[in-house]
Amino acid sequence: MCFNPSPESSSESLALGIAFMDESHRALHDRIDHLSSVADAEFAAALESLLKDVHDHFKEEEQAMEEIGFPGISCHRDQHAQALNALQQACLRAKEGAIAEGREIGGLFSQWLHFHIATMDRMLALFLQHAEASEAECATA
């Protein structure tokens, strides 16, 4: 399975207008792109590095959700947990030598990430933008 996002799933086309999310999504796409060129001998370590970055990104998103009282936080967290679990399993399998399986799961994660950004993260971004606008309105009142 190919790790490279299709042109319509590039991080630029998925920009949400929330700087921390857009920057992190770009970095994750770069990591996923990098996986496609990693030799089998380095794949498990590269996948593990991606897992750490994904974990950190999800933690930052979840903190933002808590701060604004995001109503979809439970569902959003559940999706994060499922994705992390799949990546953790892929890391374990890659460390055991199942590189092709790890690459396949990595490719599926790339597809999942595109969908997650376009749906769940887009909704979160709208709430964050609304919260920022409300704060600005209160500051000027």
Image: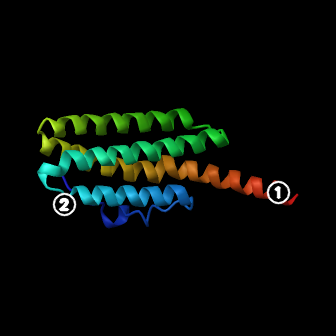
- As helix, strand or loop, the secondary structure at mark 2 comes to loop
Q: Quadrant of the C terminus?
A: bottom right
The residue at 25%/50% (across/down) is: 46
Residue 3 visible in the picture = no
CA neighbours of label 1 inside 10 A, class few (<14), some (14 to 19), many (20+): few
Q: Pointer 1: what residue?
A: 139
The residue at 80%/57% (across/down) is: 137
Identified by mark 1, the residue type is Ala
The quadrant holding residue 52 is: top left
Q: CA distance from mark 2 to mark 1?
A: 49 Å
The quadrant holding residue 79 is: top left
Q: Position of residue 22 (x, y in %)?
A: 49, 59
Please indicate whether residue 44 sits to the left or right of residue 130 in the image: left
Task: List the single residue furthest toward the right.
Answer: 141
Please tell me which of labels 2 and 1 falls first in the chain. Answer: 2
Q: Position of residue 58 (x, y in %)?
A: 46, 43
Identified by mark 2, the residue type is Ser
Q: Which mark is residue 6?
A: none
In contact (CB < 8 Å): disc 2 and disc 1: no
Q: Position of residue 9 (x, y in %)?
A: 36, 61
Q: Is residue 4 above or below residue 44?
A: below
Please indicate whether residue 102 sits to the left or right of residue 12 in the image: left
Q: Pointer 2: what residue?
A: 37
Image colouring: rainbow
Q: Nearer the viewer, residue 51 or 22?
A: 51
Please indicate whether residue 119 sits to the left or right of residue 103 in the image: right
CA neighbours of label 2 inside 10 A, class few (<14), some (14 to 19), many (20+): few
Count of numbered tags: 2
The quadrant holding residue 26 is: bottom left
Q: Position of residue 130 (x, y in %)?
A: 68, 53
- As helix, strand or loop, the secondary structure at mark 1 comes to helix
Please indicate whether residue 68 sits to the left or right of residue 17 in the image: right
